[in-house]
Amino acid sequence: MIHDFRYALRTLLARPGFSAAAVATLAIGIGATSAMFGVIDAVLLRPLPFAQAGRLVMVWERNPGFTAGDVPASPGNFLAWHRVGAFERLAAITTSGATLVGLGEPRRISTAIVTPEFFDLLGTRAAAGRLVGGDDAASGRSAVVTAGFARDSGLGHGIVGRDLRLGDSDVQVVGVLPDDFQFPGESAEVWVARDLPPGSERNVGGHSLTVVARLGTQATILSAQAELDALVAGLNRGGPNAKWTAVLVPISREGLTLESARALPILFGAVALLLVIACGNVTGLLLVRALGREREFAIRAAVGAGRWHLVRHALAESLVIAAAAGGAAVLVAGWLLVGIRTFGPADLIRLQTAAIDPRSGPAPSPTTRAT
């Protein structure tokens, strides 16, 4: 077999045009398929980077008279929902933009204001420093930043302790979020903990809060929804918000638009078909080459080469081509993933973590293991 592989390598190098065409064709097919599977693995197969993600739900408000579908919650209703016994904990987020001053040239960034329970509810651990919580909410001067923001600043984890100016507010960075942290539907780079302003319990018309809840250990989505429906009906009975309801959505369904969710399997099927076409093209090249080597095979058979020897030599050539194409496909997949991460849909959760790796199946994320 070693002799066959050496001879196969020499014969392929003697025909660089054929060899390059076969290797390039297979590399494109294998690389594209691997890149798309890397995206599907990161977005759909890997568990969400939260502790016990199956118990996390988003809570939206809904009005049959609106065509906008589910909308964020009002502060007053968010505070009232704390009375639902099926909820172990609730937290709210509101996002906005701010001009960042203090790290190079001023620039516009996305920021998120969260209630103090947010990171504890998710079970997130800091990659450096600590996360913001209840002790930081009163002042609103402590912030955590994403791992990407820390890298782009050029400071890495050294950004902990730095002072930043966000618009007309000064904050201090107290921690860095893990690499795999990304809350569904949110792309904020700086996260600040603050309490809701006084009088928020009376604000039932300003729909501005994205709400996430953790269900109790004995609760189900159905039981929590029934309890929430009863509470909302009692709160809104006879008032201007009588038609408003609240709905629970598992967090695993969030962060993927319907179009993006449908597009991933379709794209994977398309690149798998590309791989089939590539294999068919290479098969055609090998058959044409074999027809041109009839005289060589006849001479080999005449001097005593058996059928298995001829088959073994052909298999050796195919394996050499496949090995070379597999190596080149790793580079192709890497380049394609860079393009996908750069130009892919921003609403795909964890798209930026898509990569080619040797593991055999989906593994728990570092955040979940740490929790």
Image (tube, rainbow, N blue to C red):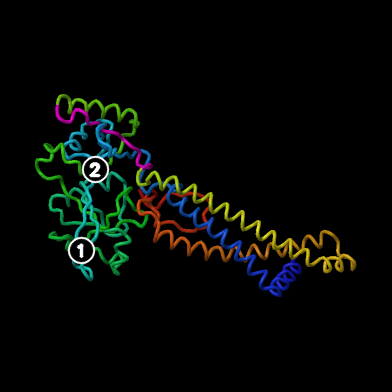
Q: Which residue is drawn at 35% across and 45% down?
A: 51
For the record, the magenta segment spans 239-253
Residue that protrudes farthest toward the bottom in the picture = 14
Is 240 part of what is drawn in magenta? yes
Q: What element carries label 1?
A: strand
Image location of residue 11, percent across then percent down: 73, 72
Mark 1 lies on residue: 100
Q: In this view, does 212 lie to the left or right of 235?
A: right
Q: Where is residue 119 in the image (x, y as percent from the top left)?
A: 27, 48
The reply to whether the magenta stretch includes residue 121 is no
Residue 321 location, x and y as percent? 66, 65
Q: Distance between the residues labelled 2 and 1?
A: 26 Å
Query: In the image, what residue occupies the spot 13% across and 50% down?
Result: 138
Labels 2, 1: front one: 1
Secondary structure beneath disc 2?
strand
Q: Which of marks 2 and 1 is nearer the N terminus?
A: 2
**Quadrant of the drawing holding the N terminus:** bottom right
User: Does residue 59 show up?
Assistant: no
In the rendered image, the vertical position of residue 233 relative to residue 320, given as above or below: above
The residue indicated by pointer 2 is: 91
Q: What residue type is labelled 1?
A: Leu
User: Which of the 4 image quadrants contains residue 154?
Assistant: bottom left
| Res. 215 in view | yes
